[in-house]
Image: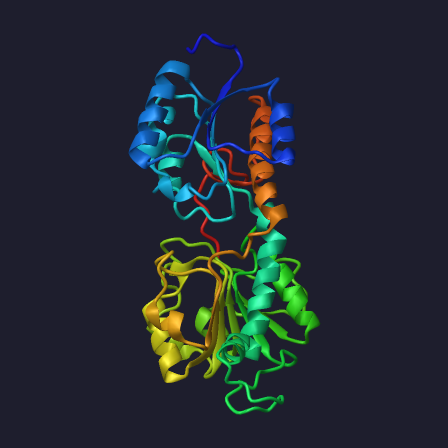
Amino acid sequence: MNGHSSLPRVVCIGWLTHAPGLAAIDQLRPYVEFDTIPYQPRPDLIAELTHLARTRGPHIALIIFLSPNMGLLGPCDAELFGPIADKGALRLVTGPGAGYDKVDLAWLASRGISYANSPSAVTEPTAISAVLLILMALRGTSANELTARAGRWTGGPAALGLVVGEDPRGLVLGLVGLGGIGKGGAVQIVAQRMAAFGMEIHYHTRHPVRGAPPTYIYHPTLPSLLRVSDVLSLHCPLTPQTTHLLSDPEFAQLKQGACVVNTSRGAVIDEDALVRALECGIVTRAALDVFEREPHIHPYLLASPRVTLSPHVAAMTRSALTGMDVEVLANLRELLELDGEGGGLRNAVCGPLMIGGGEVEGER
């Protein structure tokens, strides 16, 4: 034992400076002790976690705070978490954002540890960004902006070289997933907003969504959705089952001339196959917030005026960035409030604290 305090201990990778987060920390201080490690190269971070576990452990939770340096972490796996987990007290790892594809959920669950994300903070910003990208793809905004910036606009709305866009009214929006980020959240906001623009809402998940408006049309198979979609928008987590969910066979079944929008995870789309679909005209335009090999973007996508590029910033608003930190602290508070009485955490996606089971989430 650490000998410094009888309070349970929590290790934090990174720290926060904004007032809402500091207020949440202050509210938790009577109940836990925080040990903080700054972001640093992965080998140094693992060495410091090992030292911290030996000198200050055990720890009941590990918090990963949002930081521009999160890339230093690498995979969130046994090598990273092992030093803290080996003490036997770790119950929760919690981190920012809705995605968890870089977290080894299976290993955590096998050790009786849960992972909780922070989907609520990013729900509305992600939805609004998806709506923006759908409209930009339909209107050919990027191509027309490039024409103006290059000084090739000759004046007038019908000038030579400008893209003539599409109106959303009457077109079919195909949504892959209707639970998605913060189930009942972002993708359903997208559906509501685009329905207000007059789009017909079609969707594919493994099962029909309870409570979905009767005007939303469910497709039990992905090919069925692809064949009717004028705009295809992706809203599913990255799992082994959804990796390259869209590849050459799927693009071959997509409605000719469709637009493709992705605000989920880059590897859900086989980027090489997307390029081939753009080259042959199956896909008219694409609008992408995420990329298969981030931060590297396929050269064709970089060069094409038919592709709108957004560098994984769909949820990058001031309120969302602050909200993610506050939400991971709320996950910790929820753990403390369980106090051995059983139950689960609303945001747990694996392990014993996952409401409704302990299986790794993979719904799409």
| x and y, in percent, of residue 274 in the image | 38, 72
Q: Is residue 69 above or below residue 315?
A: above
Residue that lies at the very extreme toward the front in this rendered image: 151
Residue lying at 63% horizontally and 69% vertically, measured from the top left: 216
Q: Is residue 24 visible?
A: yes
Residue drawn at x 63%, y 81% is: 167
Q: Does 65 appear above or below 26? A: below
User: Residue 39, located in which quarter of the rendered image?
Assistant: top left
Expressed as whole percent of the image width and height from the top left, the position of residue 1 reads 41, 10
Q: Nearer the viewer, residue 130 or 82?
A: 130
Task: Return the residue found at the far right.
Answer: 196
The type of colouring in the image is: rainbow
Rendered residue at 41%/60% (across/down): 266
Query: Which residue occupies the foreground of this view, 56 or 78?
Result: 56
Residue 184 appears in view: no
Q: Residue at x 65, y 35 (%)?
A: 20
Which residue ends up furthest to the top in the rendered image? 3
Where's residue 10, x and y in %? Answer: 49, 24
**Residue 227 spot, x, y in % from top left:** 47, 79
Q: Nearer the viewer, residue 99 or 147?
A: 147
- In the displayed structure, 350 sits above or below 258; it is above
